[in-house]
Image: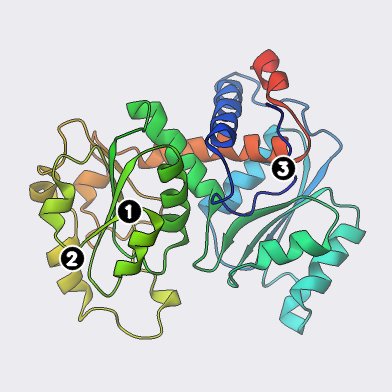
Amino acid sequence: MPWNRRHLLTLEELSREELDQIHTTATGFKKILNRSVKKVPALRGKTIVNLFLEPSTRTRMAFDMAAKRLSADVISLDAKSSSTTKGESLRDTAQTIAALQADMIVVRHSAPGSPLYLSKILDIPVINAGDGSHEHPTQGLLDTFTMRERIGDLKGRRVVILGDILFSRVARSNIQALRTLGADVTVVGPSTLVPPYFEALGVTVSHNLRKALADAEVVMLLRIQHERQNAGMFPSIGEYTSMFGLNQQRAAWLHPDAIIMHPGPINRGVEIDSELADGHRSVILDQVTNGIAVRMAVLYLCSGGQPEYVTVTG
């Protein structure tokens, strides 16, 4: 089926077919990334603006590289270099970018719903690169792409997301994509960070780490989102690690072929030991690499492209 969406705001609204289409397109672009010449002219002449009003390393660099691999012109703005430091509103900043003839805006903002808001007032595609604790769609896409690449079809597969679920936009996007793809998802962590109402999203809520990890085929670690918490959600970092940190002993509870994931940044020795983060089960760096291909697919499709082009060029 043809791709008809101009924006990528949330994974909640995407069908199984649309997730498949993005992943298939990303597969084609990943082949291009493995060539000696890692560029295609798919978006030549287009200008993409990365408006990142929250800190970012992986997402911002991956969007920047993805756009350049598609031969687009890229302009990156952060909070310090934009007029938001002078009191300019998000609306005025975004409308200025559009008036400067940008063809697409990729936005990261602390306010949930900000990309949706921009999509209603701008005539150019808007891509959500993370909005508060709401969603992080391209992270969910690259994570599920990595899972499918490693373990195949996700229908019925046991996936555990461990850590700060309450404040994590990554958790929400992964839950949406994984449920659409048919995975069996469990979220686990302290009761203050994994409230029971997450069951409404179709996942199992657990506070028993051993039970949750038993025979899991994928475990995704999440850092504690201190910047989004107004009060301490547990007594201390040491206590969190002693109860919910993933170490070698606890990794033995996983399925023998399980993979270990983390969206980054990693707090080594807190949510995961270094030997596991760097070990043979870890696909953390694969996630980073796949993030370029997946974001190439999103930029390309939301710019009006269709997968047939990727099939030919890949």
> 289 above or below 235?
above
- State how the image is colored: rainbow
Q: Residue at x 77, y 78 (%)?
A: 89
Pick whichever, 253 or 96, lies toward us. Answer: 253
| Left/right of residue 299 with respect to residue 142 in the rendered view | right
Earlier along the polypeptide chain: callout 2 or callout 1? 1
Pick whichever, 28 or 268, lies toward us. Answer: 28
Earlier along the polypeptide chain: callout 2 or callout 3? 3
Give the percent coordinates (x, y) of residue 233. Answer: 29, 79
Q: Residue at x 80, y 70 (%)?
A: 93
Q: Nearer the viewer, mark 2 or mark 1?
A: 1
| Left/right of residue 152 with respect to residue 271 in the rendered view | right
Q: Which label sits on residue 203? A: 1
Earlier along the polypeptide chain: callout 1 or callout 3? 3
Q: Amino acid at mark 1?
A: Val
Give the percent coordinates (x, y) of residue 59. Answer: 55, 51
Tell me the quarter of the image containing the C terminus.
top right
Q: Amino acid at mark 3?
A: Arg
The span from disc 2 to disc 3 (Cα, nearest Å) is 42 Å
What kind of element bears circle 3? Answer: loop
The span from disc 2 to disc 1 (Cα, nearest Å) is 24 Å
Q: Nearer the viewer, mark 2 or mark 3?
A: 3
The span from disc 1 to disc 3 (Cα, nearest Å) is 27 Å
Q: Which label sits on residue 5? A: 3
| Left/right of residue 27 with respect to residue 3 in the rendered view | left
Crowd band around label 2 with a 10 angstrom C-alpha radius: few (<14), some (14–19), many (20+)? some
| Left/right of residue 118 with respect to residue 29 in the rendered view | right
Q: Which residue is mark 2?
A: 241
Residue 108 showing in the rendered view? yes
- Residue 310 lies in quadrant: top right
